[in-house]
Image: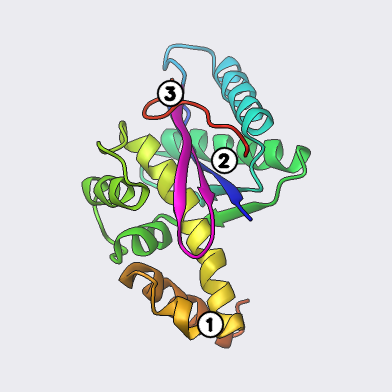
Amino acid sequence: MSFRILGVDPGLTRCGLGLVEAGRGRSLRLVDVGVARTGADEDPAHRLLHIADELEAWIRRLEPDAVAVERVFAQHNVRTVTGTAQVAGLAMVAATRAGVPVALHTPSEVKAAVTGNGRADKAQVQEMVRRILGLEQRPQPADAADALALAITHAWRAHAVGQVHGGDDARAGRQTSAQQAWARAEAAARSGGRAQRVTARPAGRG
């Protein structure tokens, strides 16, 4: 049984969108990836409307089973973080309207899950996304790779939770080091009481 996750790397100028399909074990397949773009000289309300339309179109077309959005933190550039937070909100609303569960992941969580290093740079994330999905080239631009990394993280988190509660040692032994690190982090958190197209063309649901 497959499970589709749409990753959203929110941004007002470039909003990364990437959908992966998780199969048995830790297998992942790229379905589609792209970037919704708006111009800095456009009216902010129209920019948000354009991105909202793109988000709804992706969800309607690809029918994800979950949407993973980057959790926004305050930065020095207030204008940038405001736009990023607005787009993150749009993604959450679009998913909820479609009846799709939403998950939020911090940048450090995503980097740790994909590369094993919570402080990895963008080039490292791009390269690991390329390897994990078996792509010939690194996803470009970085926003597209970040969206895929979010989707991968959510897929692996669900897998890690299954390992924690299922006790399947054989499957756990086939996990990558990054997945094993994520599973340990998930177990520790639970024990502590905290429970523009770029690379691919659309693929069919089957």
Residue 107 against residue 37 in the figure, above or below? below
Q: Are marks 1 and 3 in contact (CB under 8 Å)?
A: no
| Cβ atoms under marks 2 and 1 closer than 8 Å | no
51 sits left or right of 150 in the view:
right
Q: Quadrant of the C terminus?
A: top right
Q: Is residue 64 left or right of residue 186?
A: right
The part of the chain drawn in magenta is 17-36
Give the quarter of the figure containing the N terminus: bottom right
Give percent across and percent down for residue 30: 45, 41
Query: How far apart are the two marked residues, 1 and 3, measured between alpha carbons?
Result: 38 Å
Q: Residue at x 51, y 52 (%)?
A: 71
Q: Secondary structure at mark 3?
A: loop
- SS assignment at label 1: loop
Mark before the other along the chain sequence, 2 or 1: 2
Looking at the rendered structure, the kind of residue marked 1 is: Asp
User: Sequence order check: which comes first, mark 1 or mark 3?
Assistant: 1
Residue 56 occupies which quadrant of the picture?
top right
Identify the element where label 2 is drawn.
Answer: helix
Occupied quadrant, residue 54: top right
Residue 88's label in the rendered image is: 2
Mark 2 is surrounded, within 10 Å at the Cα level, by few (under 14), some (14 to 19) or many (20 or more) other residues, namely many
Separation of residues labelled 3 and 2 (CA atoms): 20 Å
Q: Which residue is mark 3?
A: 197
Dominant secondary structure (helix, strand or loop) of the stretch shown in magenta: strand
